[in-house]
Amino acid sequence: MSGRTVFHLSVPVRDLGEAVEFYTERLGARTGRRTDSFVDALVFGAQVTLQNDPAAVSRPMPRTRHFGATLPWDEWESVVARLTGVVPYVEAPTISFEGERTEQAKLMIADPSGNLIEIKAYRHPGEVLAPR
C-alpha cells in the first residue's frame, strides 16, 4: 500500500465485532489498526474505518447514502458467487445497458449496521470512467 493513494471512509457501526466479522468474512477485508473504538479495514483497496458508535447509526439508511467499489468484471462475478445465499441483497445483482459500451453490473448489500455498499463493474471501464 505504500506510495499509492488510498481512498478512506469512516462509517459508524452498532457492534464493532459484528462489523469486523462481516467485512472480513463476507467481503474479504483485511484489518489493520484496532482499538476499542475503531478498526481499520482494507476493503476492495479502500481504507474503511469502522467506528464503534451505535448512536450514529442511521436506520433505515437512505439509498442515496452508500459507498462501494467498482471492480473488474470477473472479480465482480466472483463476489456475486461468494455473496449469493449468504448475504441478503438490498438490490439483487443486475446488468444494465447490456451489449452497449456502457454495460454495467451492480448489486447492493447492507452491513449489519445498515451501511449500504454498492459493488459495480463496467464491461468497458474506459467508456464510462474516461474524461469527457
Image (cartoon, helix red, strand yellow):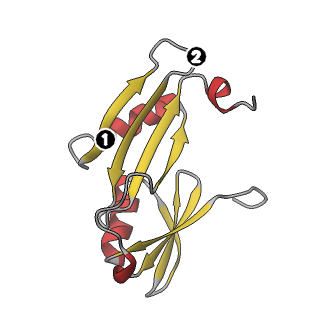
Q: Nearer the viewer, residue 68 or 39?
A: 68
Which of the 4 quarters of the picture holds residue 18? bottom left
Q: Quadrant of residue 59?
A: bottom left
Check disc 1: other Cα within 10 Å, few if <14, some if 14-19, many if 20+.
Answer: few
Task: Residue 8 in the image: state x and y as whole percent.
Answer: 61, 63
Query: Mark 2: which secondary structure?
Result: loop
Give the spatial CA distance, label 2 vs label 1.
23 Å
Residue type, mark 1 in image: Glu
The residue at the far top in this view is 99
User: What percent of the width, then of the height, locates residue 116?
Assistant: 38, 55
Q: Residue at x 27, y 45 (%)?
A: 89
Please give the name of the residue rendered at 48% of the width and 38% of the height, measured from the top-left corner.
Answer: 120
| Mark 2, residue position | 101
Question: Which of the two residues, 76 or 54, is positioned nearer the viewer here?
Answer: 54
The residue at which mark 1 appears reads as 91
Location of the N terminus by quadrant is bottom right
Residue 80 at x, y percent in the picture: 35, 37
